[in-house]
Image: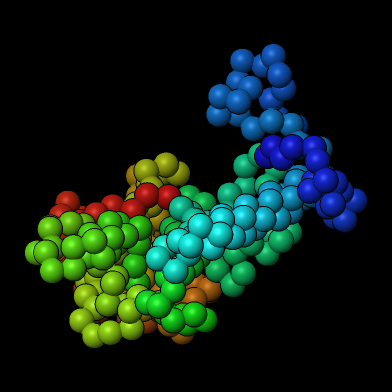
Amino acid sequence: MIVPEDSIIKKFRGMYPEKAYKGTEPGNPGFRKGGYCTQLYPHATFAAMIYRLDVYVGQIIQKLKDKGLYDNTIIIFASDNGPHMEGGADPDFFNSNGIYRGYKRDLYEGGIRVPMIISWPGHVQPGTETNFMCSFWDVLPTFEEIINPKAKQKEMDGVSMLPLLQNRKGQKEHEFLYFEFQEMNGRQAVRQGSWKLVHMNIRGDKPYYELYNLAADPSEKYNLLDKYPEKVAELKKSCFANISKIRIGRC
């Protein structure tokens, strides 16, 4: 983690307990080529990065307002995966995942459920929330419908979220979402409504499944595999059996 040594990082120095991370140094063949640099103050640096991000977003918004563009601009803020643990990162210290289980590369909600904030004056009602099941491949068809609202929608992996954003009827929903991760012996997950089936250790000696009801158990603490065998069979048949036809979510 690199943050310039300026007033922002100094603002957080000494505020947190620290454990230095030993990474690659200048002169090392792996320096800035995939390897993380040494960081003596990981917690303070992380806090400074978040603070800096907040400042930059605020500056962008202010510039849009200064230019008279804010009221005609859609602002989308999101993450591509849950918090990671490389390079001295310590997501547990800052409770980065809240109630959600897992981290980046996990197919539990902590690895694949991410924040998504959308601001669009005059269209998206401020302060509202939704539990609509969506993913990044829904953004492109949404933009297409905004640009050409009367045009015939092209065949895409995603669905337009414009009706949802404008709080009107006609919002299409996904039948299910599918995710897979090839490392760690292979992992799969499928979500259909509030139900989620996870397939773990696929290429290992003992592959296994887990079933969760996210509406009742968003933290995925209670494996319902044995309690709802019919739901497991349904998800295997309707979702895992059709993975060649659907968009794959990577972590």
Does residue 54 sit above or below 6 in this rendering?
below
Q: Is residue 119 left or right of residue 203?
A: right
Q: Quadrant of residue 229?
A: bottom left
x, y percent for residue 125: 44, 81
Q: Is residue 118 left or right of residue 59?
A: left
Quadrant (top left/top right/bottom left/bottom right) for the N terminus: top right
Instruction: Give the residue displayed 52% in from the left and 52% down from the top.
Output: 104
Q: Viewer-proximal residue, 146 or 5?
A: 146
Q: Viewer-proximal residue, 156 or 234?
A: 156
x, y percent for residue 244: 17, 51
Instruction: Give the residue displayed 70% in from the left and 55% down from the top.
Output: 51
Q: Is residue 210 visible?
A: no
Report the label total.
Answer: 0
Instruction: Give the residue displayed 71% in from the left and 40% down from the top.
Output: 3
x, y percent for residue 160: 25, 67
Does residue 131 sit above or below 6 in this rendering?
below
Q: Is residue 48 left or right of residue 73?
A: right
Q: Viewer-proximal residue, 65 or 24?
A: 65
Instruction: Give the residue displayed 44% in from the left and 74% down from the top.
Output: 121
